[in-house]
Image (spheres, rainbow, N blue to C red):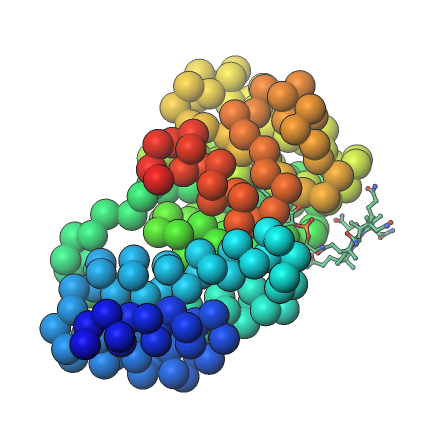
Amino acid sequence: MAEAILEELAEKLIQGKAPEVKELTQKAIDAGMGAGQILDDGLVAGMAVIGDRFKRNEVYVPEVLIAARAMNAGMTLLKPLLQEAGVEPKGTVVVGTVKGDLHDIGKNLVCMMLEGAGYNVVDLGVNVEADKFIAACDENQAHALGMSALLTTTMTSMKTTIDAFSEAGARDKVKIIVGGAPLTQNFADEIGADGYAPDAASAVDILDEIIGAA
Ligand code: B12
């Protein structure tokens, strides 16, 4: 019975059906299932399928956004219960688009995927200066920082930011991952990032790997 509800919940999330996801989340809660179980075996399981399909180009940005909206519909019911139950997130990740860059569609997808995978995400928005990244990582005791850049002219802000972390003595406290259409693994290596991912679903994989939260 429990398994059937959670399977249906994952399936409706994959289909992007927000009202049904909300309804089934409530049904699972009413059936006495734990918030952590509903999250992991229902919502996160569904989002993982979307992530895999997105990686394989079987679904595109709109489908991911619609699935993320459905995920949020379930999360509004689960969040208070998760807090009450003290279910720990996998880790805290500060995310932002670097200074001079206003592109945020990819960054928002990364945030949604990370939240969907069980991370606590602090989204700083766009045009974020190095000092703001450093302060936010410190205030939130972040395990990781994710930086996004879509312009060849702003990719360099990533190196400036990583250098600023080193100068502030904060580089060892946080793992740094980078992404955005013009980036490559080579570039990430050159600027001293800990990880790079070409898409939002792989961002989860790389983060799980480098902070050991899989
Ligand atoms: C939409 C868009 C805009 C919108 C942005 C709206 C918004 N809210 O984001 C607007 C109109 C504002 C805009 C403005 C500009 N844009 Co523009 N824009 C685009 C466009 C068409 C799509 C970008 C996008 O959203 N892609 C979809 C997302 C899902 O993909 P993504 O961002 O790459 O993200 C994925 C991965 O890269 C990865 N990822 C992303 N971030 C991160 C972070 C981490 C940590 C990780 C792990 C992974 C990761 O995961 C994401 C999901 O899978 C691209 C062209 C293109 N086809 O890419 C041009 C493009 C990026 N823009 C370009 C330019 C030049 C500009 C402007 C300078 C234009 C102008 N002359 O004013 C301004 C710059 C404004 C500024 N200061 O930022 C150029 C950049 C060229 C270059 N080599 O630098 C492009 C490539 C267009 C072109 N062919 O010339 N733009």
* Residue in the foreground of this view, choosing between 164 and 175: 175
163 vs 211, left or right, is right
* Residue in the foreground of this view, choosing between 134 and 78: 78
150 vs 2, left or right, is right
**What residue is drawn where x is 16% and y is 79%?**
30
**What residue is drawn where x is 41% and y is 68%?**
71
Residue 80 figure quarter: bottom left
Q: Is residue 130 visible?
A: no
Query: Vertically, is 103 above or below 29?
Result: above
Residue, far left: 32
**What residue is drawn where x is 56% and y is 64%?**
64
* Residue in the foreground of this view, choosing between 53 and 188: 53
Q: Position of residue 114 (x, y in %)?
A: 45, 50
The quarter of the rendered structure image containing the N terminus is bottom left
Q: Position of residue 14 (x, y in %)?
A: 47, 70
Residue, far right: 153
Q: Position of residue 41 (x, y in %)?
A: 29, 61
Query: Vertically, is 9 above or below 117?
Result: below
Residue 5 figure quarter: bottom left
Residue 77 figure quarter: bottom left
Q: Is residue 161 visible?
A: yes
The quarter of the rendered structure image containing the C terminus is top left
44 vs 205, left or right, is left
How many marks overall? 0
**What residue is drawn where x is 52% and y is 39%?**
146
